[in-house]
Image: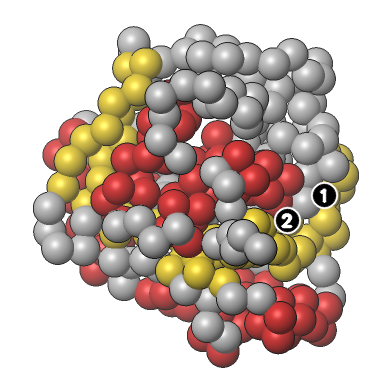
Amino acid sequence: MKEFPEALTIAGTDSGGGAGMMADIKTMQACHVFSTSVVVGVTAQNTLDVQKVFPMPLEMVDAQFASIADDFVIKAAKTGALFDAEHVANVAKNIKKYSLGSLVVDPVMVAKGGAKLLTDDAIDTVISDLIPLADIITPNMPEAETIVKHPIDGKDAIMQAAQEIQKMGAKNVVIKGGHSDGPENKDYVLLADGNDFWMTGKHVDSKRKHGTGDTLSSVMVAELAKGCHVEQAIKRAKAYMNEILQHEIHVGQGHGPLNHWGAEGTDVEI
């Protein structure tokens, strides 16, 4: 019997299938890692908008964590949309309680269509309870600005913000530059040992990018579950994203999903 690395996504569902836990599971599968899940909330969502959000009862979240820990050997885990302060605190409590390997925190705050997936009062709980547990944190620019609580304008400001987030407890920081204009997008990486670098990708003019943050962080989780070094996991995630963005699929009428099998048959190592 062939054993597969086992990983965990702790997030909300996307009934449209493009983001959230659905994107996590598809991505990990594409990376040849078995994905388990803890559903923190359920959304009624499609490519046009998020219509309704329902956070799960805390006792059900606890039960899912206990069930996973009782049967699986989780090598790496990630968080996505956690909805409110109560659920953030609960998830952090469970992460500390169980052995879940390396943790990637994707501080999801707003859906691609603009719907809020994290309440304002939960930001401080993310900072106090969740960020100190992160082996890697992957905010986009608006999320990074919310975390450091000031605007980030320019290359030097991005580097400074990463240092501020690292001082909050996250070991490795990836500030994503996908929201920027221009022919390229640049992500800044600050590693735990103080080394840093920029990762570049070609800007793709497309509205079919629903779930990009979930997908990027899920590749990192999958690679960490395989035993990859943090820097290697981050670089592989960027290479995977650069590849699949070139191979669109046309699903839905709004912000369409990514092609999670778009790297198959290429030289992208996952």
What residue do we see at 62% from left, 31% from top?
260
- Identity of the residue drawn at 27% across and 51% down: 231
Would residue 224 appear left or right of 39 to someone viewing this image? left
Residue 238 image offset from top left, x and y in percent? 39, 35
Residue 157 image point, x, y percent: 20, 42
* Whether residue 225 is visible: yes
204 sits to left or right of 28: left
**Which one is earlier in the sequence, the residue at label 1 or at label 2?**
2
Task: Please report contact status of discs 1 and 2: CB closer than 8 Å, yes or no.
Answer: yes
Amino acid type at circle 2 is Gly
The answer to which image quadrant residue 73 occupies is bottom right
State the mark number for residue 12. 2
Give above or below for 229 relative to 131: above
Whether 253 is drawn above or below 103: the answer is: above
User: Which one is nearer the viewer's eye here, 220 or 141?
Assistant: 220
Tell me the element at label 1.
strand
Mark 1 = which residue? 43
